[in-house]
Amino acid sequence: MRQSSLVVVANRLPVDDSVARDGACEWRRSPGGLVSALHPILQHTPATWVGWAGGTGPAPSLPDIDGVRMHTVALSHEDIRDHYEGFANATLWPLYHDSVEQPAYHRRWWEAYQRVNQRFAEAAAAAAEPGALVWVQDYHLQLVPGMLRALRPDLLIGFFLHVPFPPPELFMQLPRRAELMLGMLGADLVGFQRAQAAHNFAQLATKVLKVPATDRRIAIDDRVVRIGAFPVSINMSEMESLAARPDVLERARQLRSDLGDPQHVILSVDRMDYTKGIEQRLKAYSELIADGHIKVRDTVMVQVAVPSRERVEQYRILRDRVEREVGRINGEFGRVGEPAIHYLNQSFSRADLAALYRVADIMAVTPLRDGMNLVAKEYVAARVDDDGALLLSEFAGAAAEFQQAYLVNPHDLDGLKLTLMHALEASPTDVADRMRSMRGHLRTHDIRAWVHGYLTALDRTGSLAARLTA
Ligand code: G6P
């Protein structure tokens, strides 16, 4: 096997499988995300991406994407059920998001989590050349750094958690809490979205593992593991160019006219997930209509809820509840040809999303808890004319950077209603001042800065990171 000096390990490969016109499956780079972040680095470095291609059965062999080798890890039906849908998305996901849904604990899921993590660690070990840098991503693979270190002590290992890391009171519930922490501590650098998460992790290291820990370093065995906050970002210039493309502008004009040329368009774009606060937002909106503060003809709400993890029970229940509520609101407040809420349970192309962002006078991003929320950052990037109001939950990682957004506590319905009205009625200068300042921040904190910041922190000798990010 060809080996690489940089190996990225993530549950998913950066590919979409889409059906080509002739019915065959074609693979292409999935838009946005980590792969476009890493793109500038990957062009100069022989790199490999280790991940799952999305289906069951034997791993398909995929062509390189933009010069990056795709190393697929196969998952069986049982692996998907017990590792991906089970331990990752029905134990860790709800627990790490403030337990807004009850996490489930099953011993069989833990076995699958270990087994699948071991498979990813072995794949990464096989793909890495001597002394390579291996960067492991997210909560699906928390055991990989430890397993990889056991296999390949020569490697420089990074781990980054894209989701929140919970306070000790919650994490302590986990039956296998010590093993999960030891797994992450196999890395040389453990990165989080926010400083609070690093603090939680340090406290837990002292409590669970009884090792010396500060918010910057943890001493374990004869090593020092560094920890810290590295807020992830987006490719701002890519979104800016997309949002300025003539066909996207034309699409935005068309959308606005299809919506009946209202005075205000409020947009939300979420995965259909119970952490996103969709129900609370719908409730606030319908109360504002019922109270007479919002008129359906003047103001239109568009809710995009991208299908997600549909085989997990809590996601199915959520979808039913959201759809019932949208039906109720439209039944009560809509008119023929004028629904109160335009609800779309489907995914959109990058260009269509950019057009939606251009149409939205107000973007409502109100998760109950979110590691970062890249939709908030994409919206800011798309508003090339410095207009548009961002209504943002205090509980999204993005709020730490976007203090100029209209910040809300999504659990506080009255506060949510007041802030939404405040954003709707804000003066164009107030909106523009806020947007300009957020755009200024994003420009210097885009995805390139994130990758550079993380990799230079990981490789303190500077030689490898300098070569990679040159
Ligand atoms: C979150 C996670 C990602 C994950 C994404 C989509 O953002 O942090 O690791 O890939 O959700 O979820 P999915 O289950 O479709 O991979």
Image (cartoon, helix red, strand yellow):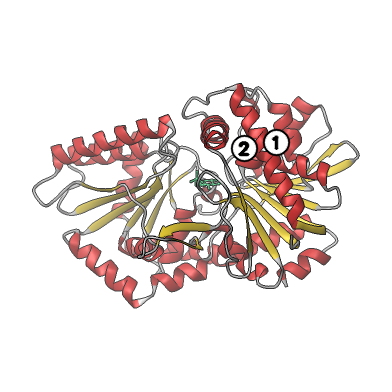
Residue depicted at x 52% and y 58%: 15
* Residue drawn at point x = 76 percent, y = 40 percent: 147
Alpha-carbon span between mark 2 and mark 1: 7 Å
Q: Where in the figure is residue 210, as x and y percent of width and height?
A: 81, 27
Residue placed under numbered mark 1 in the picture: 201
Mark 1 CB within 8 Å of ligand 1:
no
Residue drawn at x 70%, y 47% is 159
Quarter of the image holding residue 246? bottom left
| Residue 91 seen from this side | yes
User: What element does badge 1 sit on?
Assistant: helix
Could you say which disc has been placed on residue 284 in the image?
Answer: none
Q: Give the crowd class for mark 2: few <14, some 14-19, many >=20 residues within 10 Å.
A: many
Closer to the camera in the image, 13 or 371: 13
Question: What amino acid type should be assigned to the residue bearing mark 1?
Answer: Phe
Cβ of mark 2 under 8 Å from ligand 1: the answer is no
Tell me which residue sits at (53%, 65%) in the image: 235
User: Seen in the image, is 192 located left or right of residue 290?
Assistant: right
The residue sitting at the left extreme is: 336
Name the kind of residue labelled 2 in the image.
Phe
Left/right of residue 170 with respect to residue 420 in the rendered view: right
Of the residues under marks 2 and 1, which one precedes in the sequence?
2
Query: Which residue carries the number 2 mark?
Result: 165
Could you tell me residue 219's position as x and y percent?
85, 38
- Residue 90 in the image, given as x and y percentages of width and height: 51, 31
